[in-house]
Image (tube, rainbow, N blue to C red):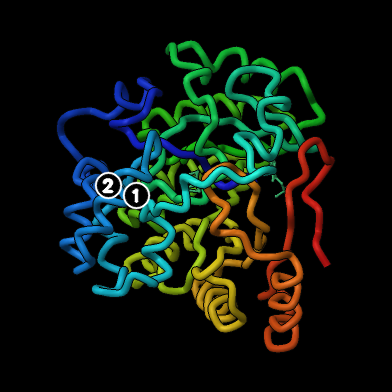
Amino acid sequence: MFYAGPMNILTSRDSSVRTYLPAKPEIAWQRELRTAIRDPKILCRQLELPASWARMAHEAGGDFPLFVPASYLRRIERGNPEDPLLRQILPVAEELDETVGFIEDPVGDRAATFEPGLLHKYRGRALLLLTGACAVHCRYCFRRHFPYDALPHAPNAWDRPLAALAADDSIHEVILSGGDPLMWVDRRLATLVERISAIGHIRRLRVHTRLPVMIPSRVTGALLKWLAGGRLTPVVVLHANHARELSEDVAVAVTRLHRAGAMLLNQAVLLRRVNDSVAAQASLCERLVELRVVPYYLHQLDRVRSAVHFEVPVERGLEIVEALRRQLPGYAVPRYVQEVAGGPYKVLLR
Ligand SMILES: *Cc1c(COP(=O)(O)O)cnc(C)c1O
Ligand code: SF4
C-alpha cells in the first residue's frame, strides 16, 4: 500500500526530522505533535476506558507505541471501546499474535528501492520517502516495520535521488511519501519541490499524507505556496478511513487545499470493526465528496505482521463495494485494490 509510514518525531530513528523542527517559535501543528498522547494511561483516563486497557496497550505497543494527537482524540467517543477511530490507534493484545503469511515487508518495498529514499515501482511515477515520521501510529500500517534508518540524512542526501529522477525522462510524476512527508517543515519542503520543479520532464507533484486529517492546522499558507504555487500540477492523496475522522476543522483544512487548486483524492484501508460495513463506507464516501475529495482507493489490508486482527475477507470487501455501486454515483465509489509485490500496478479486485 502507499499511504505514508510510521514513527513519531521523538521515537523516530530519523534524526533529520528532529533537526528540522525548530524549538522556537513553535507553530500550532508542531505544538500538537509535541503534546500528542503517548501514554496509554492518559488516553484511557481521557476516554473513560478501563485501566486494564492501558496496561494492554503498553505491552502490545512494542517498538511502535501509542501515538495520537489531541485533535484526533477529540473525535473519539468516550467510554466506547468499539469506537472505530479508537481501534485505529490503540495497541491491543492481538498485535502480539504471530500468523503465518503476515510478514514485515508485504508489498516488496525493499526490493523496489534503488536509491535510498527513492522507490520506483510503477511506470511514470516515482516515490520519494522523505521520512519515517508520522502524526499518528496507525496500528494496521504496512510500513510499521520499514527500515527507515536507511533513508537519507545529510543535508546533501537528496542529491542522488534527485539526480536519478533527472536522469530518467520516463518519470512525469513525483510522489512525496513516507512516513508522512508533511512532517517536514515547509521551508525544507519548499526547497525540495523547487529542485523537483527544475527537472523539465516532471509534470505533477503528488503528496500522500494523513496529516491534514490528524492535525488540520498543518495546512499552512506556506504549504499551499510550495504545493500549488509553482509549475507542477498538485495532487493530494489524503487518508481517512471513517466519516467521523472528517470533522469540521478537517473540512476547513481540506477546503483550503481545494481552493489553492490541488486535486484531492482519498485512500482508505478496509479494516475489520472500523469500516467493514456498507453504511460506514457509504457515509465515508458521501462525506468525502461533500468536501470535494474523490474516494480514490479502498485498499485490501496488506498482510503485515501485527495487523492480522484488522483483516476483512476479500469476498466481504467485494460485497460492500457492490452495494456501494448500487447506491452511490460512480465517482463516489472507490476502486477496491490490493498491492501485489513486484506487480506493475495495484490489482483491482472485482
Ligand atoms: C500505489 C503506488 C504508487 C501510485 O499508484 P497509483 O495507482 O498511481 O495511485 C506509486 N508508487 C508506489 C510504490 C505505490 O505503492
Ligand atoms: S499515517 Fe498511519 S498508515 Fe500512514 S504511514 Fe503513518 S502510521 Fe502508516
Closer to the N terminus: mark 1 or mark 2?
Answer: 2
Instruction: In the rendered view, tell whether residue 157 sits above or below residue 131.
Output: above
Instruction: In the rendered view, tell whether residue 73 sits above or below residue 125.
Output: below
Q: Mark 1 near ligand 2 (CB under 8 Å)?
A: no
Q: Secondary structure at mark 1?
A: helix
Picture residue at 54% right of the left edge, 50% below the top: 307
Q: Position of residue 270 (x, y in %)?
A: 60, 63
Q: Nearer the viewer, residue 311 or 70?
A: 311
Residue 240's label in the rendered image is none
Q: Nearer the viewer, residue 64 or 226?
A: 64
Type of residue at label 2?
A: Trp
Q: Nearer the viewer, residue 190 or 280?
A: 280
Q: Is residue 50 left or right of residue 125?
A: left
Q: Position of residue 204 (x, y in %)?
A: 66, 42
Q: Circles 1 and 2: CB distance less than 8 Å?
A: yes
Type of residue at label 1?
A: Arg
- Separation (CA) of disc 1 from disc 2: 5 Å
Picture residue at 58% right of the left edge, 23% below the top: 117
Picture residue at 30% right of the left edge, 25% below the top: 18
Q: Position of residue 224 (x, y in %)?
A: 43, 48
Residue 29's label in the rendered image is 2
Q: Which residue is mark 1?
A: 218
Quadrant location of the C terminus in the rendered image: bottom right
Q: Is residue 66 left or right of residue 328?
A: left
Q: Is residue 306 left or right of residue 350?
A: left
